[in-house]
Image: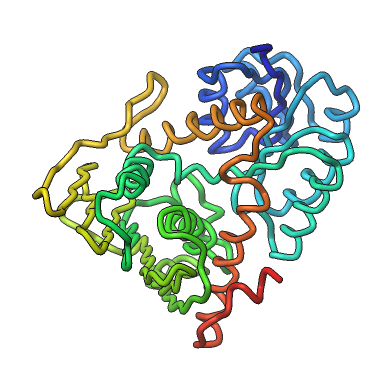
Amino acid sequence: MTELKGALIGCGFFAINQMHAWNDVRGAGIVAICDRDPERLKIVGDQFGIDRRYGDAEALFADGGFDFVDIATTVESHRFLVEMAARNKVPAICQKPFAKTLSDAKAMVEACRNAGIPLMVHENFRWQTPIQAVRKALDSNAIGTPFWGRFSFRSAYDVFSGQPYLAEGERFIIEDLGIHTLDIARYILGDVRSLTARTKRVNPGIKGEDVATILLDHENGATSVVDVSYATRLSREPFPETLIELDGSEGTIRLTQGYGLEITNAKGTTTTDVSPKLLPWASRPWHNIQESVYAIQQHWVDQLERGAEHSTSGADNLKTFALVEAAYDSAAEGQTIDVGAMLR
């Protein structure tokens, strides 16, 4: 495989994980970086030995010399940068959340489709080792046809110390964390027909919601609950684990705290350790997320080589983004929202 050359736009908090992962990915490497903050640009450039450094994305694209762009900026700039990539015919990865609005996200997908370039959203949670293990168990028909599920992320972890801007937005947990959990629900149980959501702000020091409970009606007839909280203090902090419960026609699956996968069916109960690897550059408890960053970036390169669509393509992520918008609409209106109507 000829190594693909990539450019990273955005050298903030999470981009360090992406740079480490790019060093591990087979078949690709980052050759240029871009950020408006000269200090961040120097820190990342020096740490990873990147000589090509830009303070302006237009200048980066004008110079070219790369095969894809990894957009790791905040959401306000996503549409502008993705459309810039489309104009320059450069395949693009876009950080989540995909866009500010569903109409923006649709426009970004359309721009890349018209330009004939791949667009993938960096929706890495479905690439976590334990989540993949649940998917494989379902695919092996371990519990027959699933009819009910719960996808839970409840924690009191202080996410604001590393990302203080999260406390300032009118939207918080659904847009920042729930988007991952909703995507996992789609990945495991399929697309969603309608949803009902309730939200709450427990922490008085933030502007947005820090608790959300969402009921999903899946197109295949299954029902699931997505519940997320950054206001839940437990005897053992589970951050950053997503816990899963699935009931099927022939048994049950439980992904429990500590990365245990418990399957119960006619053969009895088996428990398997599905812990993520601790990569050399990773650190606990973030290693679950950090490993998934490597996994999704390797997927990006592998699918480019095959000429195949990505698991979290822009078109696929529209369905997840619609769930986020529908959840906020439902919570505001106190009504069930038709998700399909939002996508039409």
In this picture, is 250 found above or below 68? below
Q: Is residue 259 left or right of residue 7?
A: left
x%, y% of residue 110? 80, 53
Image quadrant containing the N terminus: top right
In this picture, is 70 found above or below 212? above
Q: Residue placed at 45% from the left, 35% from the top?
A: 292
Labels in figure, total: 0
Q: How was the colour assigned to the protein in this rendering? A: rainbow
x%, y% of residue 73? 67, 43
Seen from the viewer's position, the closer of residues 84 and 323 is 323
Q: Residue placed at 42% from the left, 50% from the top?
A: 159
x%, y% of residue 61? 85, 30
Q: Is residue 248 left or right of residue 271?
A: right
Q: Residue placed at 52% from the left, 35% from the top?
A: 296
In this picture, is 200 found above or below 333? above
Seen from the viewer's position, the closer of residues 2 and 158 is 2
Image quadrant containing the C terminus: bottom right
x%, y% of residue 21? 51, 25
Q: Residue placed at 56% from the left, 31% from the top?
A: 297
Judged from this view, the residue extending furthest toward the left is 268
